[in-house]
Image (spheres, rainbow, N blue to C red):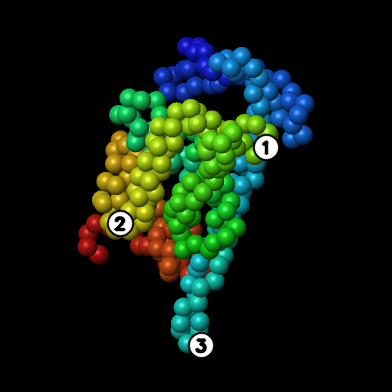
Amino acid sequence: MLEEKKRCWRLNYAREFHLDVSPTIVNPGCSNGGELVPDKSLSEFKPTNPKGYRALFEERASMQPRLKVRKAIASDRQANIEPFPVHMRAKGILRRTVQLLKRHRDIYFFEIEADIAPISIVITTLAAQAYECCVNTFTFDSELDVVIATIRMMPHFIDRPFVNGKLMYVVANETTVGENFAERWNKEPQRATAFSAWHAKALADFENLAELEGLDRITKKLGDSYGKTVVARVMDARTEQVSGARASQKLFVTPMVGLTLTNSAAATAVPKNTYFGE
């Protein structure tokens, strides 16, 4: 189904996916390869730069936070904390953080009739800026701490300049001039209020998650935030992965890490469970 939007045409398919197609022209005023996109409601062209935005996001996503690892010193057996780079997975922490935040937003606003949920580009932009700041500034105890710090810092990157004597909201596209992802907040302040309320809930949920113990409690909390069906499917897959690794003797336990599928000098293989009490 083809749907006309403010600055693009949207092709909806499979009831849950969509593709936005925008006609653009070169923006001669942007030295970073920006473009101009027609705005239907304003009957004028507006600046944008999707290629530049993507390049900047990928640059930030490639940044590696530093985690603390505790090493026992042989001489006095005391713990020493040394920072080390995180082993990067395929998607990386920033991409996963954005995915989690967008899913959390969808669940949070699911039963709210008003169309006031923060748009994805605002969430992505603030998360990317916050992530870069956190990675450059702090050393963390865990990857979850990186996510929490990133979420906590997001509001700090919402600019509040005075324009013609009026306090405005600005979440700028840093790769061009004149594109404000939060421009609707200035005409519809309830959107800014909705963002603040959702952000506070998301931060609280992640902070509470860090304090939980026990797989059942963690599963319940995740289900409340991200949907019980999705979480149950993920947890079942994880259980099968761990069980399969244990059965094939590819499950290990290491100090300060716990269960892992990665073998190392400090790792101890977890024996197969024969279910016979042996």
Residue 25 appears at what percent x and percent y?
71, 20
Q: Is residue 114 left or right of residue 37?
A: left
The first of marks 1 and 2 along the sequence is: 1
Q: Which x, y percent locates residue 254?
A: 43, 66
Q: Which residue matches tag 2?
A: 212
Asked if the residue under mark 2 is in contact with the one under mark 3, i.e. CB atoms within 8 Å, the reply is no
Question: Which residue is identified by label 3?
Answer: 75
3 or 1: tag closer to the N-terminus: 3
Q: Does 134 sit left or right of 201 as displayed?
A: right
> How many residues crowd mark 3 within 10 Å: few (<14), some (14–19), many (20+)?
few
The residue labelled by disc 1 is 175
Circle 2: residue type = Leu
Give the residue drawn at x 27%, y 46%. 220
Residue found 62% across the figure and 31% down from its top: 179
Residue 190 position by quadrant: top left
Question: Quick check: 170 above or below 213?
Answer: above
Residue, far bottom: 75
Helix, strand or loop status at disc 3: loop
Report the side of 68 relative to 54 (left or right): left
Q: Compare marks 3 and 2 and give the one earlier in the sequence.
A: 3
Cα distance between the residues tagged 3 and 2: 35 Å
Give how far apart the Cα atoms at labels 3 and 1 are. 53 Å
Question: Alpha-carbon neighbours of circle 1 within 10 Å: few (<14), some, or many (≥20)?
Answer: many
